[in-house]
Image: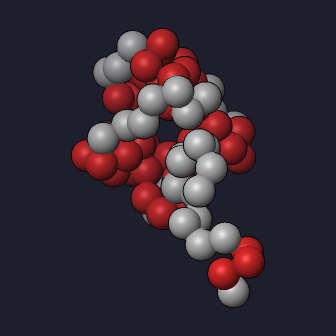
Amino acid sequence: MGKDLNRLKVVLAEKRRTNKWLAQQLDKDPATVSKWCTNKAQPSLETLSEIAMSLEVDVKDLLQSSIRKSDY
């Protein structure tokens, strides 16, 4: 599996939201959200749930699939 575990950056772009907006929604430091978006750090499962609620998406939409195309 690759190093990129979450799709947060992609989902933010799809929803036309910024890292700064998400940081404000979650009351988190913008630097922390930036690390999540670049996959240098990962949010906890609880925080991932809060992110999904803020972005109005399913939690699984924020995660990379663990199934590789060659697994089909």
Q: Nearer the viewer, residue 64 or 54?
A: 64
Q: Where is the C terminus found, in terms of image quarters?
A: bottom right
The image's colour scheme reads: secondary structure
Q: Is residue 69 above or below residue 2?
A: below
In the image, residue 11 above or below residue 21: below
Left or right of residue 53, residue 18 in this image: right
Left or right? Give the position of 52 relative to 7: left
The N terminus lies in quadrant? bottom right
Residue at the spot x=41%, y=43% of the render?
A: 51
Seen in the picture, residue 66 relative to 12 is either above or below; the reply is: below
Percent x, y of residue 58: 46, 62
- Residue 12 seen in the figure: no
On screen, residue 64 versus residue 31, left or right, reads right
Answer whether residue 49 is visible to the viewer in this image: yes
Which residue is nearer to you in this view: 16 or 72? 72
Question: Residue 44, percent across and down?
Answer: 30, 41
Residue lying farthest to the left in this orientation: 46
Quarter of the rendering containing residue 50: top left
In the rendered view, tell whether residue 16 sits above or below residue 45: above
Picture residue at 62% right of the left edge, 50% below the top? 2
